[in-house]
Amino acid sequence: MRRVRAAAAVTVLSALAAVTGCGGGSSSGGSNESPRTLTYWASNQGPSIEADKKILTPELKKFEKETGIKVKLEVVPWADLLNRILAATSSGQGPDVLNIGNTWSASLQATGALLPWDEKNFEAIGGRDRFVDSAVASAGASDQDPAAVPLYSLAYALYYNKKMFADAGISAPPATWDELVADGKKLSRDGTWALGAEGANLSNNIHQVFVLAKQHGADFFDASGKPTFTSDGAVAAVKQYVDFMAKDKIVAPGNAEYAQNQSLQDFSKGTTAMVLWQAAASTFASQGMKPDDWGVAPVPVPAGAPGADKSTNSMVAGINIAVFKNTKNVDGAKKFVKFMTSDKEQILLNKTFGAIPPVKAAQEDEAFSAPELKVLRDTLAASAAPLPQVASESQFETTVGTAVKELWADAAAGRQVTTESVRERLTKAQQQMQQ
């Protein structure tokens, strides 16, 4: 699934947490081949794997022409990527260079499998100060050298169907959650629904409740990295999210089973009026929507005077590029990272994929002044926060993401969702983290 990622199995991650110095060295990959060959696992960024290959292949040919190093490309679906990476860190059967979701950085960093990006390694690609601070902050634990380098930056926005809004007499997109619910009740009629959700997608659940928790003044981990899933703010955040279906009736019950971009498909067909998503323009276009059919606005915040946390309306989303530490071609791998993060490639690739360059100079290109990208860029600069950079982040996605999925299922089935039932599910998730 594009950008919204599947979490790894808890048992697999726990087993790999003790692994150090693994990865690379594949007998079938680039690591044991000529220093003139690299193997690269790219995440699926575009509408399809074939589309990504079509976009990336000419760029890899440019790199080969410049350096003499051939890159063997595999575009890996999001549903498979994390488990593929975890298996590679355990078995050593992996690529030289790979993309990772930035929320996985600290978890994969803890395996010891990825090359640390210390000052020397950053200097080899032009220096750390080329990159936006918030993007680097999402590349590993704050007290360690980053485990990867930012490649594509993303944030969440609210996308809305202009015609459906006009037909309902709504003149502007909602700026607060109260407005969203009020508008949603006007929009949910005649077989259409106001808001799309991906209730069965664990990572998407985490992204949404993380932001709502920040708005409620809560975090899912304390300063020491200990889970605090059952705090009043965390419970209120999860309940608020599920209540869009359970209480407010502005999300279709069937969304509880969505996990593979179905909410985007509903939006593109005009059966859902709003969706919270990361850079969606290329997906809408591929599904037949015209640019004038939809609008984009920042994700809503609570009503009232915003504080530091209340103004948070997105997690810092994005893709990082990493190198397996024991690749036989470290120099070639770093040259490839330098190429992919060069100003020219950053402009081309991020423009094509509808993302924001994490490289400061590339952000200044006029390609990123379009309305959608301006909203995403402003969000990243002013109101996005990184997910917890803790070693157990992937387990957090699994346990809390599953708790939210189960609550969506309750709401879809007409079972009551209460503060007590939410706290019960989050208590179970916290207990699983401690096992």
Image (cartoon, rainbow, N blue to C red):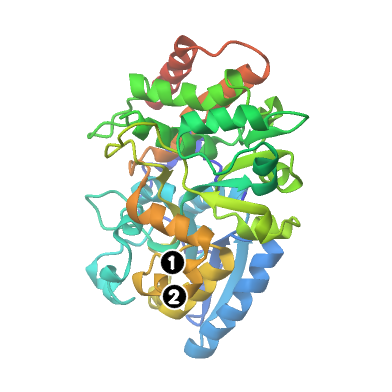
Total numbered labels placed on residues in the image: 2
Q: Please, what secondary structure does the residue beneath circle 1 have? A: loop
Q: Is residue 3 visible?
A: no
Q: Which residue is mark 1?
A: 357
Image height check: is 406 above or below 38?
above
Q: Position of residue 138 (x, y in %)?
A: 35, 52
Question: Which numbered disc, 2 or 1, marks the residue closer to the eye?
Answer: 2
Residue 326, position in %: x, y? 39, 64
Kind of residue at badge 1 = Pro
Q: Quadrant of residue 200?
A: top right
- Quadrant housing the C terminus: top left
Q: Nearer the viewer, residue 156 or 92?
A: 156
Nearer the observer, 87 or 365? 365
Tag 2 secondary structure: loop
Name the N-terminal-most of marks 2 and 1: 1
Residue 217 versus residue 34 in the image, above or below: above
Residue under the point 70% across and 40% down? 167
Q: CA distance from mark 2 to mark 1?
A: 10 Å
Taking 250 as reference, is 262 above or below it? below
Q: Residue at x 57, y 27 (%)?
A: 405
Quarter-of-image position of residue 432: top left
Q: Are marks 2 and 1 in contact (CB under 8 Å)?
A: yes
User: Residue at image x 29%, y 48%?
Assistant: 141
Percent across and percent down for residue 308 are 27, 40
Q: Nearer the viewer, residue 2 or 239?
A: 239
Left or right: residue 64 compared with residue 313? right
Can residue 212 be seen here? yes
Q: Going 49% across and 61% down the picture, which residue do you hit?
A: 373
How packed mark 1 is, by other alpha carbons closer than 10 Å (few <14, some 14-19, many 20 or more), is many
Which three-letter amino acid code belongs to the residue tagged 2? Asp
In the rendered structure, find residue 365 and report the number of the disc placed on it.
2
- Please state if 113 lies on the left or on the right of 203 as rendered: left
